[in-house]
Image (cartoon, grey):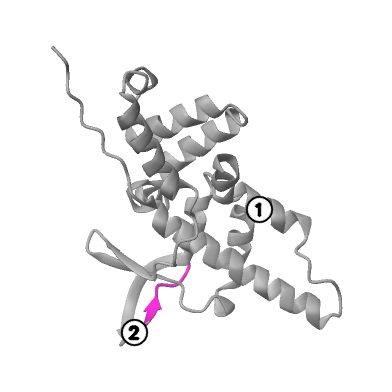
Amino acid sequence: MKKEIQIVVPKDWSAITLRKYLEFQSDLKAYEGEDDAILASMFYHLCAVTPDIMLKLDTETFTKIKNDLYSFVGNTDVPLVQSFFRNGIEYGFYPNLSKIEYGAYVDICKHTANGISEDWVKVMAILYRPIKKKFGKLYEVANYTGEEESEWFLDLGMDVHFGAWFFFINLSTDLLKGILKSLGTSTDIPPNIRQILVESGEAIHQLLV
């Protein structure tokens, strides 16, 4: 008698938590250049399909799942999520990064050195804070204390993480280009900034295309 199993294939990054993404990212780096191992890792981390079950799938099912995964995994260009609710509390992205506290800015720079890594949750706790007051579409967030809880961001969908990451990196890149242009120097992005981008979700795209 054949045993039926249910496979849930995610359609976008909102279904993948940061915790799962970090595990997946670790395998991508470990198996770089090994296409079969990377594919098995995709099935395991994104669909909870173990390698032994993957090998037993019929060709049509296997191909459909693979194509569905490829259709979104390489797309990390997602919009910024301005706010969201957790446990009845609304969190909002810091409304004006040009006015962010200096201590918060220093901590962001420290924890983004390796892209979206284990330290990224600390950045998210800085960028997203409880909303204290709302004025129409405008809002005011809680002050930065340096003691914000961050571990729960591991269980937040990657749509929120990627949206914040690329918003922050694109803004920083634009500001840097503006500064370099005003100084009359080349506007090429420095190698260290390029490396940060490679270490981010773009690495997935580069490995799978």
Instruction: Identify the secondary structure beneath mark 1.
Output: helix
In this rendering, the answer to whether 50 lies above or below 115 is above
- Tag 1: Cα neighbours inside 10 Å, few (<14), some, or many (≥20)? some
Secondary structure beneath dot 2 equals loop
Single out the residue that lies furthest toward the front: 60
Please rate how many residues cluster around mark 2, counting C-alpha atoms within 10 Å: few if below 14, some from 14 to 19, many from 20.
Answer: few
Whether residue 67 is in magenta: the answer is no
Q: Which residue is mark 1?
A: 196
Q: Is residue 147 magenta?
A: yes
Residue at 39% from the left image edge and 51% from the top image edge: 13
Instruction: Determine if residue 113 is in view.
Output: no
Please give the range of residues in magenta: 139-148
Q: Residue at x 35, y 30 (%)?
A: 62
- Measured as percent of width and height from the top left, residue 198 is found at 64, 49
The image's mark for residue 137 is 2
On the rendered structure, is 196 left or right of 72?
Answer: right
In front: 207, or 14?
A: 207
Residue type marked 2: Lys
Quarter of the image with the N terminus is: top left
Residue type at mark 1 is Ile
Q: Residue at the spot x=47%, y=31% of the render?
A: 39
